[in-house]
Image (cartoon, rainbow, N blue to C red):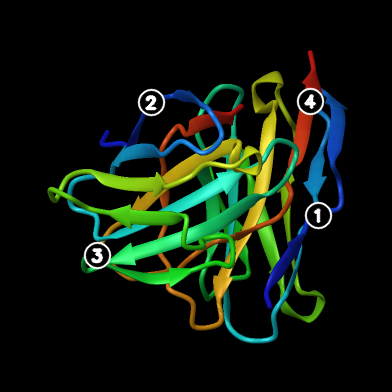
Amino acid sequence: EPEVTQTPSHQVTQMGQEVILRCVPISNHLYFYWYRQILGQKVEFLVSFYNNEISEKSEIFDDQFSVERPDGSNFTLKIRSTKLEDSAMYFCASHGPSGKHNEQFFGPGTRLTVL
Amino acid sequence: AQSVSQHNHHVILSEAASLELGCNYSYGGTVNLFWYVQYPGQHLQLLLKYFSGDPLVKGIKGFEAEFIKSKFSFNLRKPSVQWSDTAEYFCAVTGGGSQGNLIFGKGTKLSVKP
């Protein structure tokens, strides 16, 4: 069964450093998302991406964040200058072409620890 | 803005007990409702979803949920839980013209004692 994959599973970085979190969505999917979950808190939407552009973003997704689909396969989330409060699990999700409200398939997450 | 409330933070049950996890959402328009489950060490998986039609929806592993529009609720139920149901359960909603991004509740951790 096809699945969403994410790398790395755990990333440790120093405050102020740039990180890139990688996701490979399911191959025929067209809608891509990033969510994050700070420890003990709810899963929060960050950004959605469709047709090679951001379609929606939350207040959390400020200028420090960017997303890219560089090669038609990977979907990346970049944090330019990490802050302590960026420590969280970051989940990538995707869904197929049959409508924007269909089931989203989630990756296993990347745990980001900012020291 | 839409929001989702899950009233129980942690539920502890014995095997064979019945389960009901509460979920309420705040949005007056058309919504799509989901329950996701996260087993220990695994990623979020869809249990069931409601888009339209019969308000009682059946999902995988014997779970069901009932959409009650007048109460803005979408409670998850299972008549008899098993130890393997130990997991965290998340209610989520989309709607309001969004591009499909999910608004999640805080989650309910279910622990089933063997």
On the image, numbered disc 2 is attached to which residue? A8
Disc 3 to disc 1, how far (Cα)?
Answer: 31 Å
Disc 2 to disc 3, how far (Cα)?
Answer: 27 Å
Task: Tell me the mark number nearer the camera, choosing from 2 and 1.
Answer: 2
Q: On the rendered image, what quadrant is the C terminus of chain A found in?
A: top right
Q: Residues within 10 Å of mark 2 (few under 14, many from 20)?
A: some
- Marks 2 and 3 close (CB-CB < 8 Å): no
Badge number at residue B111: 4
Disc 4 to disc 3, how far (Cα)?
Answer: 36 Å
* Depth check, front residue: B88 or B13: B88
Please tell me in which quadrant of the rendered image residue B6 appears.
bottom right
Say what amino acid the circle numbered 3 marks: Pro
- A25 up-or-down from B71: above or below: above
Q: Residue at x 78, y 23 (%)?
A: B112
- B60 up-or-down from A56: above or below: above
Task: Tell me the mark number nearer the camera, choosing from 3 and 1.
Answer: 3
